């Protein structure tokens, strides 16, 4: 009996789901559960992480992320505008910056800000400032490209309408073009925050006081406790998801909203 | 639209264009245009696609930079390199084929943003001016809508209200009804007719020959970057002298007509 396309799709999808269930059951049967739960889900070790993991680590991760995102967005906007500028040297400077900071591992930028610059110039930054600058400057390179695309996606007629109402170029940019560009890039910008949240774990490179620990450092510190196993890292991982999953949902919501308003 | 919605225009500015030339690369689009629009006069600009009508209009408020010639707009020589472009543009309202409303602002804000940012009016004053102009175009009840919640005809009327809110002394229209559904064209033309009666100086690129015959003081026919024929609407549209004008009008007024070529 011949099947319609839709029937065939349904059958193949049922088979795929079936296979997935079999694999999951096999994995569950073969795994050594007592050992796993002792190493990763030791309830005593979970309990010992609280409340520090929330009031210190989660809070610091959020602070590092938000600070560096603010630097990233302001720097990224400036770079995007330079990249679209009719002035050649602005464009070249922006291009060099973007290519450099996108090409170099964030870890090296952290080392440069944490040790290189302090050694070279004898300045000591506060940890929060170091994170803000190191992460923020890397983020700016990525955000610049995102924002440039957003600025270019705003129809030319918007600038023309604003100019013909007597707005100077900068005023039309600030009031009309940039707000629309941000709406267009809201989904990729949200994804950028998710990446930053995870990159804030690089703070472990800097010498930190316990009150400055963020999630990863806090988790690494936790596993050195006797009998904790790897459970503290699992708890830290769960805390990352508490931040990133809502952001992911938000990004998808923005995406479907902009898809709807585009006629 | 009732006669009570006619608001007399206090200041009306004229336009005087001499020897205007404009090229894109090696493509000369305007080949020496002379055109005078007296204060309070309504001039319709007609001509085939690519003849340079939009370019001419856009040169008047310097959205395009002319290569040669002079343009005087209400006391400004806009082709003077030292002219304050933004000051000149405040006197010149422009309405685009694609409306170019600001999609991130509601209807009222569309009409107030330039008033507050450019003319430095207070928000309540700007709101009052905007509301008055929205009522003038028959849309006073839609001031809290966003552009994507309006029909094309409504959007174009908002665009007219937005331009009028800057108290212009001259209005430029570039095919204001070409992107509209046929049933909404009439509303926009009615608004323009009232504006003309109120004494506004208007330079209108249009394919609406009915509007040109009824409202225009003068009709200018352009082809290939030059003015081919100009005069009272009844003469240029009703009894054209030039062969090119006759040919163009035959195609516009009877688009399905096919010339039967006889050998
Ligand atoms: N920004 C530009 N760059 C290069 N060429 C241009 C540009 N704008 C217009 N042109 C060219 O100039 C010529 C005149 O264009 P214009 O838009 O003024 O014609 P138009 O009379 O308004 O035509 P339409 O009725 O189709 O709107 C066309 O050949 C067009 O290709
Ligand atoms: Mg045109």
Image (tube, rainbow, N blue to C red):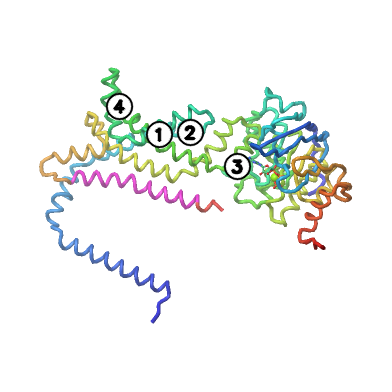
- Left or right: B189, with A46 as reference point: right
Per the rendered image, the range of residues in magenta is A231-258
| Contact between labelled residues 1 and 2, with CB atoms less than 8 Å apart | yes
Locate residue B28, reporting x and y percent.
70, 38
The residue sitting at 87% across, 48% down in the picture is: B240
Disc 3, SS: loop
Task: Judge the density around disc 4: few (<14), some (14-19), many (≥20) Cα neighbours within 10 Å.
Answer: many
The residue sitting at 12% across, 54% down in the picture is: A35
- Left or right: B86, with B223 as reference point: left
**Chain bearing mark 2:** A
Q: Which residue is mark 3?
A: B102
Disc 4, SS: helix
Q: CA distance from mark 3 to mark 2?
A: 24 Å
Looking at the image, is mark 4 or mark 1 earlier in the sequence?
A: 1
Q: CA distance from mark 2 to mark 1?
A: 10 Å
Q: Within the magenta stretch, is there residue B185?
A: no
**Marks 4 and 3 share the same chain:** no
Looking at the image, is mark 2 or mark 4 earlier in the sequence?
A: 2
Q: CA distance from mark 4 to mark 3?
A: 42 Å
Q: Tag on residue A113?
A: 4
Q: Quadrant of the N terminus of chain A?
A: bottom left
Q: Which residue is mark 2?
A: A83
Q: Main secondary structure of the magenta part?
A: helix
Can residue A218 be spotted in the picture? yes
Disc 2, SS: helix
**Marks 2 and 4 share the same chain:** yes
The residue sitting at 60% across, 43% down in the picture is: B106
Q: Which residue is mark 1?
A: A98
Q: Within the magenta stretch, is there residue A239?
A: yes
- A131 vs B259, nearest the viewer: B259
């Amino acid at each position: 009996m011949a099947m319609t396309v839709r029937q065939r799709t349904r059958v193949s999808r049922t088979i795929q789901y079936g296979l997935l269930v079999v694999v999951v059951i096999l994995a569950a049967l073969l795994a050594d559960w007592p050992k796993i739960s002792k190493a990763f889900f030791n309830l005593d070790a979970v309990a010992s992480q609280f409340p520090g993991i929330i009031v210190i680590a989660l809070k610091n991760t959020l602070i590092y992320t938000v600070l560096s995102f603010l630097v990233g967005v302001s720097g990224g906007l400036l770079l995007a505008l330079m990249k679209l500028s009719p002035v050649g040297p602005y464009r070249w400077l922006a291009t060099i910056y973007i290519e450099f900071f996108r090409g170099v591992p964030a870890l090296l930028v952290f080392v440069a800000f944490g040790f290189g610059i302090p050694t070279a110039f004898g300045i000591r930054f506060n940890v929060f400032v170091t994170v803000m600058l190191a992460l923020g400057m890397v983020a700016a390179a990525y955000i610049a490209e995102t924002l440039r695309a957003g600025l270019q996606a705003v129809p030319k007629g918007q600038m023309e309408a604003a100019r013909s109402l007597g707005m100077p170029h900068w005023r039309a940019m600030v009031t009309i073009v940039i707000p629309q560009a941000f709406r267009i890039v809201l989904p990729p910008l949200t994804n950028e925050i998710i990446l930053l949240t995870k990159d804030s774990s690089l703070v472990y490179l800097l010498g930190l006081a316990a009150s400055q620990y963020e999630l990863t450092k806090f988790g690494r510190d936790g596993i050195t406790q006797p009998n904790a196993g790897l459970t503290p890292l699992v708890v830290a991982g769960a805390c990352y998801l508490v931040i990133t999953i809502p952001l992911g949902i938000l990004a998808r919501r923005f995406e479907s909203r902009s898809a709807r308003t585009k006629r | 639209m009732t006669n009570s919605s006619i608001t007399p225009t206090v200041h009306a500015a004229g336009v005087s264009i001499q020897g205007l030339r404009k090229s894109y690369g090696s493509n000369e689009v305007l080949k020496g245009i002379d055109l005078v629009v007296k204060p309070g006069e309504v001039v319709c600009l007609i001509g085939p696609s690519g003849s340079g009508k939009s370019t001419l209009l856009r040169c008047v408020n310097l959205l395009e930079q002319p290569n040669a010639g002079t343009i005087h707009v209400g006391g400004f020589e806009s082709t003077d390199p030292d002219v304050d472009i933004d000051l000149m543009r405040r006197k010149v309202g422009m309405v685009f084929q694609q409306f170019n409303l600001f999609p991130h602002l509601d209807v009222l804000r569309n009409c107030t943003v330039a008033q507050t940012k450019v003319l430095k009016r207070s928000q309540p004053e700007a709101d009052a001016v905007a509301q008055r102009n929205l009522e003038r175009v028959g849309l006073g009840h839609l001031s809290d809508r966003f552009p994507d919640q309006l029909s094309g005809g409504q959007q174009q009327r908002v665009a007219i209200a937005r331009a009028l809110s800057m108290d212009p002394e001259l209005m430029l229209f570039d095919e204001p009804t070409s992107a509209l559904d046929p049933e909404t064209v009439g509303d926009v033309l009615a608004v323009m007719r009232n504006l003309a009666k109120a004494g506004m100086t208007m330079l209108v690129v249009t394919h609406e020959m009915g509007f040109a015959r009824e409202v225009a003081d003068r009709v200018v026919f352009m082809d290939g970057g030059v003015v081919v024929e100009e005069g009272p609407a009844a003469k240029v549209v009703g009894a054209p002298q030039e062969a090119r004008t006759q040919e163009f009008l035959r195609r516009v007024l009877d688009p399905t007509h096919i010339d039967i070529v006889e050998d």
